[in-house]
Image: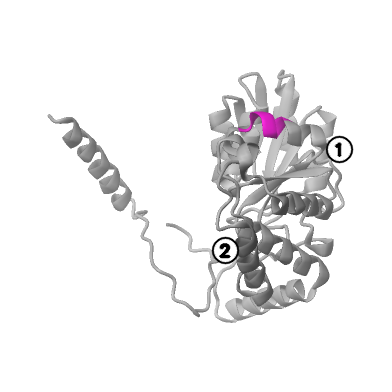
Amino acid sequence: MPVSEVWHQRLAAARDERERQQRWRNRRVSAHGALDFAGNDYLGLAQDPRVQAAQAEGAKRFGAGAGASHLVSGHLGIHDALEEALAEWTGRERALLFSTGYMANLGVLQALADPYTAIFQDRLNHASLLDGGALSGARSRRYHHRDGHDLQRLLARSTATHKLVVSDGVFSMDGDIADVGELAHISQQHGAWLMIDDAHGLGVLGENGAGCVAGFNSQQVPILVGTLGKALGTAGAFVAGDAALIEHLIQFSRSYVYTTAQPPGIAAATLEALTIVQREPEHRQRLTRHIDYFRQQAAALGLPLGHSHTPIQPLLLGSE
């Protein structure tokens, strides 16, 4: 049998199986101006004229693209300014830009973990965290969702020298929030580092939109991951922590080293969005009103929702 035919048979079998499970995915072009219940532009900043103008001006001033990776010649002044602003916002010593949240999580776990590392993940963590743990070669265990006792049990049994506890901040499917205080306490008890991916909390929760990690320092949460394409309305991601962590990622994170830097227009737009998030709390207040209204109307219609009070509102169908 020709090699090409073997591959086509494999693709067809995979499609048949997914269609049998009624899980085949289809893309569709989003209708402009439609009411969107599925997107992540929580504060509407992707459509804010000030953010749009900053992006256009950034592209005009610095170019449409960075032209190289950060370690070659693609790290521009606007990237430096954004990293400093993100570090200040999150109360960390430094921050480091990544192309996407997925690449940030893969890059952190690959750079920190090895076969002698033990990673402990919440069962409902985002796929990028689970994939990063698998690709790192570390020994990975998953504890019951938001269950500190189960995490304690697994950590107590571990003989690994380096332990890493990993959790979403706001869980991307259920919308519930990790108990960061409990996770920090348990991690410190067992000499583990704690990594929080606050993709859906930054810009939405906490004072100045600093997320569910607001009030926790880098000793309690050594690794903070955030995305720029949700509440901030642009694209990309960052990791924030102390200088030693960031320098380690610059040296060893392959998804940082071997990727073209973020387009400078995006960096400029993100700086503007970050200023708006910190200076104009009315955007978060409006979001809270929208969430409350949605929950009230869903209840009136008898629609079964979860218990989330974040922008992620799961409609419970009972099955796939």
- Disc 1 to disc 2, C-alpha distance: 33 Å
* Residue 166 numbered tag: none
The furthest residue to the left = 1
The image shows residue 262 at horizontal and vertical percentages of: 60, 51
Camera-side residue of 135 and 296: 135
| Residue at the spot 61% in from the left edge and 53% down from the top edge | 236
* Residue 219 numbered tag: 1
Q: Which residue, given by chain and number where applicable, does mark 2 sit on?
A: 314
Camera-side residue of 97 and 42: 97
Residue 143 in sight in this render: no
SS class, disc 1: loop
Above or below, 28 against 152 in this view is below
**Residue 265 part of the magenta segment:** no
Of the residues under marks 1 and 2, which one precedes in the sequence?
1
Camera-side residue of 2 and 289: 2
Picture quadrant of residue 46: bottom right
Q: Quick check: 274 left or right of 69?
A: right
Picture quadrant of residue 289: bottom right
Camera-side residue of 74 and 26: 74
Which three-letter amino acid code belongs to the residue tagged 2?
Pro
Q: Which residues are magenta?
A: 248-253
The image shows residue 163 at horizontal and vertical percentages of: 72, 27
On-image quarter of the C terminus: bottom left
On-image quarter of the N terminus: top left
SS class, disc 2: loop
Magenta span main SS: helix
Instruction: Characterize the local packing of mark 2: few (<14), some (14-19) or many (20 or more) Cα atoms within 10 angstroms.
Output: some
Q: Quick check: 139 left or right of 198?
A: left
The image shows residue 202 at horizontal and vertical percentages of: 73, 57
Above or below, 125 against 280 in this view is above
Q: Quick check: 71 left or right of 274?
A: left
The image shows residue 276 at horizontal and vertical percentages of: 76, 69
